[in-house]
Image (spheres, rainbow, N blue to C red):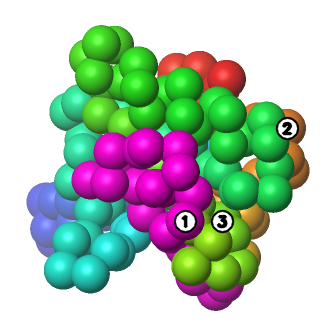
């Protein structure tokens, strides 16, 4: 009877410690696991989880926010030289305005995505987007290394 009790208690503790180890807190601060999200464009879908193992630069931008738009243009052009995957998420209300900006700014279409209003709300909350910090460098392990 004691052996059964000890075995059950040991298994329960192992399960508890294993689940606590795997549930890493996601947050938009340096050193934390980056909050996961999925973006779509036509028949193309990309999730941050799919890019695990690579260094990723995530940029949130809007055509009405000049600083974020210029930052996105700079990162779009430099990401291939930096050896990073660039994942750019537009936060405009109008997808038409976003499409116009893509053409005018001569951005690489494969890295550019538009978030709809519901997704914008989720991203703003999960990533604590306040208009100041809009670019995040995420390491191969999924942790945020730097905020630009």
Residue highlighted by disc 2: 132
Q: Which mark is residue 130?
A: none
| Residue 138 image offset from top left, x and y in percent | 44, 31
Quadrant of the drawing holding the C terminus:
top right
Which residue reaches farthest front? 104
Please say whether residue 96 is visible from this viewpoint: yes
Front residue (pair 23, 10): 23
Above-or-below relation of 49 to 105: below
Which residue shows up at 14% across the image and 68% down it?
A: 4
Residue lying farthest bottom? 118
Q: Is residue 103 left or right of residue 80?
A: right
The percent position of residue 105, horizontal first and vertical second, equals 53, 44
Is the residue under label 3 in contact with that under label 2 (CB below 8 Å)?
no
Q: Secondary structure at mark 2?
A: loop
Identity of the residue drawn at 21% across and 71% down: 44
Q: Which residue is mark 3?
A: 91
- Is disc 1 placed on a helix, strand or loop? helix
Q: Is any atom of residue 27 visible in this view?
A: no
Question: Which is nearer the N-term, disc 2 or disc 3?
Answer: 3
Residue bearing the label numbered 1? 100
What's the magenta region?
A: 99-118
Q: Is residue 114 magenta?
A: yes
Please give the name of the residue rendered at 70% of the width and 56% of the height, measured from the top-left corner. Answer: 62
**Residue 146 found in image quarter:** top right
């Amino acid at each position: 009877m004691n052996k059964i009790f000890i075995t059950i208690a040991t298994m329960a503790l192992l399960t508890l410690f294993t689940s606590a180890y795997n549930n890493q807190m996601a947050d938009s601060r340096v050193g934390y696991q980056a909050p996961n999200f999925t973006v779509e464009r036509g028949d193309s879908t990309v999730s941050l989880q799919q890019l695990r193992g690579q260094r990723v630069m995530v940029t949130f931008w809007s055509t009405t926010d000049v600083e974020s738009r210029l930052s996105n243009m700079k990162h779009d052009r430099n990401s291939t030289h930096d050896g990073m995957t660039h994942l750019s998420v537009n936060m405009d209300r109008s997808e038409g305005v976003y499409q116009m900006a893509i053409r005018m700014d001569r951005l690489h279409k494969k890295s550019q995505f538009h978030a709809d209003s519901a997704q914008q709300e989720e991203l703003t909350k999960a990533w604590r987007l306040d208009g100041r910090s809009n670019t995040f460098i995420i390491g191969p392990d999924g942790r945020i290394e730097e905020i630009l």
